[in-house]
Image (cartoon, grey):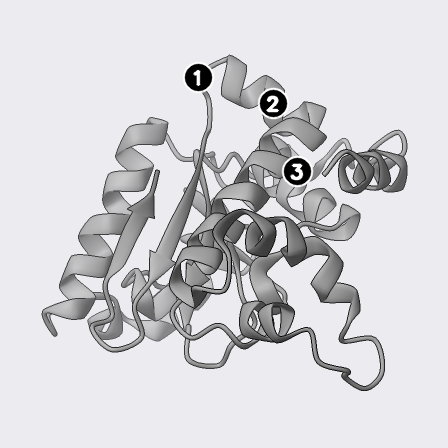
Amino acid sequence: MAGLMAGLMAGLGSGIAWPGSARAQAPAPSQMTPDQALQAMMDGNKRYTQGQMTSLNEDLKELKEKTAEGQAPFAAVLSCADSRVPVELVFDQSIGHLFVVRVAGNVVTPELIASLEYGVAVLGTKALMVLGHARCGAVQATIDAKAVPGQISVLYRAIRPAVDQAGANLEAATKANAKIQAGLLASASPVIAEHIKNNQLKVVAGYYDLASGAVSMVS
């Protein structure tokens, strides 16, 4: 874990040079509190599981016009790249509401931290969820530790601490991985840590059940 943290910090270097006009060009940041942002996500997921989605009924033309010149998402999500986890649909959110970054295994890398720092510091997101999911292939592959082609094995190193902690139980390891990655975000990024300290942001871990569509918090 210490080596992984050191690598992340080294990769981040001195951080991102934010464009001075970025805030001025974008819509006003969300006025939600972090708790309200998380509740909005969970309320949206409840609508999704109950088949009562509202985002699909919104006027697409109007949405595109409102977001053409900028964005002000109220929350960010670090999700797995799995095609069965359509983040905006899962939380019943339309264009411009969620800032989503995706990578197999929802693992933290310097590039992903930089993207999420942009969401937090420039766009004003109030909540950040690391979202693991049922039957995650990246976590299962780490458990199996089988030879894989190309660069796929790079993911193993990031997920291995969760497998070491939770063992070969896929659900337990996936939840542990989401929690570990959320902790890395909160500790490896001074930008994110500062927003947490100032009560401007909450970082949490979540778990998406493919069968039910429900998202649960991982504590």
Quadrant hosting residue 64? bottom left
Quarter of the picture containing the N terminus is top right
For the residues marked 3 and 1, what is the alpha-carbon distance in whole angstroms?
A: 16 Å
Q: Position of residue 153 (x, y in %)?
A: 77, 72
Return the residue nearer the eye: 21 or 102. Answer: 102
Counting residues from the start of the chain, the first of labels 3 and 2 encountered is: 3
Can residue 109 be seen here?
Answer: yes
Q: Between label 3 and label 2, give the one nearer the viewer.
A: 2
Q: Please, which residue is most extreme toward the bottom here? A: 149
Instruction: Please tell me how crowded label 1 is: few (under 14), some (14-19), or many (20+) other residues with Cα within 10 Å.
Output: few
In the drawing, what numbered circle is on residue 117? 3
Proximity of marks 1 and 2: CB atoms separated by less than 8 Å: no
Q: Which residue is mark 2?
A: 193
* Dot 1 amino acid type: Asn
Q: Which residue is mark 1?
A: 199
Can residue 77 be seen here?
Answer: no
Determine whether the residue tagged by mark 1 lies in a helix, strand or loop. Answer: loop
Q: Position of residue 54 (x, y in %)?
A: 18, 66
* Dot 3 amino acid type: Glu
* Dot 2 amino acid type: Ala
